[in-house]
Amino acid sequence: MKKKLLSALLSVAMVATLLVGCGGATTTVEEAAETTTEVAETTEEASGDVTTYKVGVAIYQFDDNFMTLYRNEIESYFASLCTDTVKYEVTTVDGKNDMATQTDQIRNFITQGMDAIICNLVQTSSAEVIIDEVVAAGIPLILINREPLGDNGDESYAGILDNATVCYVGADARQSGTYQGEIVLALDNKGDINGDGKVSYVMIVGDPENPDAQYRTEFSIKALNDAGMETECLVEQVGNWATDKGQEIAATALSQHGDAVEVIFCNNDGMALGAAAAIEAAGRKVGEDIYLLGVDALEECQQMVSEGTMTGTVLNDHIGQSHKAVDVTVEALNGNAIDNYYWVDYVMIK
């Protein structure tokens, strides 16, 4: 038995996993192999006195600032729920922003006999493949953070609604975009710094295939337009959630359009941090001659808001979302019915 367990764990190591057991410790899979084997053998010897659940967590990319907070909280919260009779073994994998890699990881989870799978999709358009394979294996699937949409772009995705063991846990990104717009509307000049009757802006987009990015892009401007403000898009480019891309796009936009840029909207705080660096390098000052918005409310960005070097951000509650995802997973593991959708509200930070 020990050889079989070690072999399975070493195969998981090839896709750069982390395995977290109870007690809050985090180790590499190679380091955890012996410990995991001992847990399994002890459970056998105890004749079922200890129930151990294996949970696979697939994250689209470890380099994402927000998802780092999210996955760490998943792991620590599972550890906090361990008791003398119930244990959770959590294996977390990095999809490296590659759908083929993530699909292989999900298939490995199925082969390894995971009791539940939590998945932060690389591509929401590939949800159907993931859902079909996990459902066919009889494993509960909890999708997080990236909401798969139906063919018409609505929120009702049949692949989730048609399966009693599949759900989505997340926040409504339309709300986050709306909050960005409302932060600008709350300013004395409503974002129209030069007084020409319109808000001229730069939009730095996360991932065009991600519904969160689509909604934040659309609804931030919709909030301004619905309030009667005219808007002008000077630049809209994809930054793929990355700080360096945010800086590059903002720097180019400021170089091309100069003082005409009144607001820079970023779909996340990571890109906003890059934009902030570009704003400073261009000799502009947030709050005086330009405004900067993000989403996620990273600790650094909340500090910047309080200092006036960032206009506002929107709290994407990684603690509330991660805890809800874990709670729903535990319900499913216990054989209880779960809903198809669970929503966690954003919070405006200004």
Image (cartoon, rainbow, N blue to C red):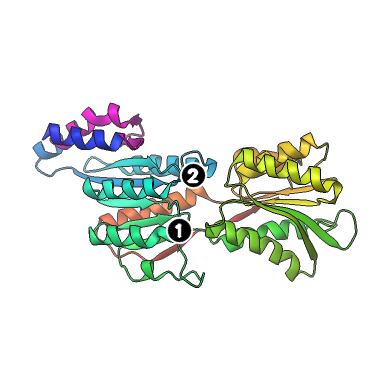
Relative placement, left or right, of 256 versus 4 is right
Tell me the residue that label 1 is attached to.
124
Tell me if residue 312 comes above or below residue 169 in the rendering.
above
N-terminal-most mark, 2 or 1 = 2
Residue beneath the point at 50% across and 48% down: 318
Residue 270 in sight in this render: yes
Q: Residue 258 got which mark?
A: none
Q: Using residue 304 as the reference point, say whether residue 189 is left or right of it.
A: right
Q: In the image, residue 348 lies at what x, y percent?
A: 65, 54
Extent of the magenta region: 14-41
> Where residue 159 appears, x then y in whole percent?
37, 67
Instruction: Check if residue 61 falls in the magenta segment.
Output: no
> Is residue 258 or residue 343 the one in the foreground?
258
Q: Secondary structure at mark 2?
A: helix
Identity of the residue drawn at 59% across and 60% down: 214
What SS does tag 1 mark?
Answer: helix
Q: Is residue 37 magenta?
A: yes
Say which amino acid is labelled 1.
Thr
**Residue indicated by mark 2:** 67
Residue occupying image coordinates x 31% and y 35%: 14
CA distance separating discs 2 and 1: 16 Å
